[in-house]
Image (spheres, rainbow, N blue to C red):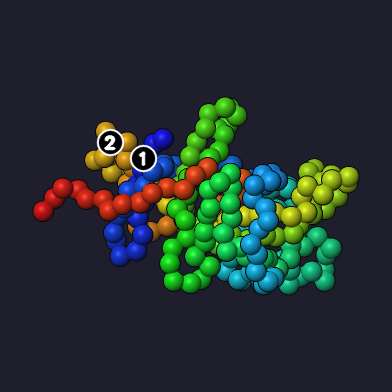
Amino acid sequence: MAMGANSVGNGRKFNFYGSQSDVNGILGNEPLPPTSFPLSVSKSSSMGDIDYPHLLEYYKLAYLTPDLVHYQNAFASPFFVDNQIIKLKSINILGQVYYGNNDITGCGSYVQSLFLGSDRSTETTFTCQIKYIFIHSFTPPSTSPYYEADSTHHDQHVFAFVNWLPLLRDKSQEKNRVDICSSTPSLLNYYSILPVHRISLEVAIANHTTGLV
């Protein structure tokens, strides 16, 4: 497993086990393994107006349906994305438990996500911190090329809303297979909507020092 670097707050830098590069291809949905259930859920709530546009954009791109509209314009079209979500306190994926900070004191899990490259065989990893984990119900309209009339596969999605940690050009720890990441997360966008089946493992963090006095 590659080692990398993570950083949070006050300009401090930390090391983590994982790696980070350009975020691509965060689209698609797969059912959770049976070990994930039952889920520990809270009551339904409204997704924040800052985060919601990223969820809307995610669905537009994931299902090739640019005509989807904001929930505030639901009266104008049957093809809208609801803003109601159910937050999860945690989720168990293949024996590993992941947490969001859920707007309380403490940090959400730092995780490594796994993607296939454009050749569908090369594995690429990215590192992020989970803000919160949530369930959202959505069925693509019949105009979508991904619509399946006889399937409920797309009805319920489980996502992590994440902060991506951009990789710095610091090569000082390259021989130790450690990457150094910025203390400032990437700007939020639809990439922040991460299907939980993309999560590979949790990463450990530790203080990173340059050896300078």
Residue 27 at x, y percent in the picture: 64, 45
Near mark 2 (Cα within 10 A), the count class, few <14, some 14-19 or many ≥20, is few
- Circle 2 residue: 176
The answer to whether residue 88 is seen in the rendering is yes
Residue 117 at x, y percent in the picture: 55, 33
- Image: 119 above or below 207: above
Location of the N terminus (image quadrant): top left
Residue at horizontal 41%, vertical 42%?
18
How far apart marks 1 and 2 lie (CA) works out to 8 Å
**Residue nearer the viewer, 19 or 206:** 206
Residue at horizontal 52%, vertical 42%?
200
Q: Residues at badges 1 and 2 in contact (C-beta under 8 Å)?
A: yes
Residue 53 at x, y percent in the picture: 63, 63
Amino acid residing under circle 1? Met
Secondary structure of the residue carrying tag 1 is: loop
- Circle 1 residue: 3
**Residue nearer the viewer, 27 or 160:** 160
* Identity of the residue furthest to the left in this view: 213
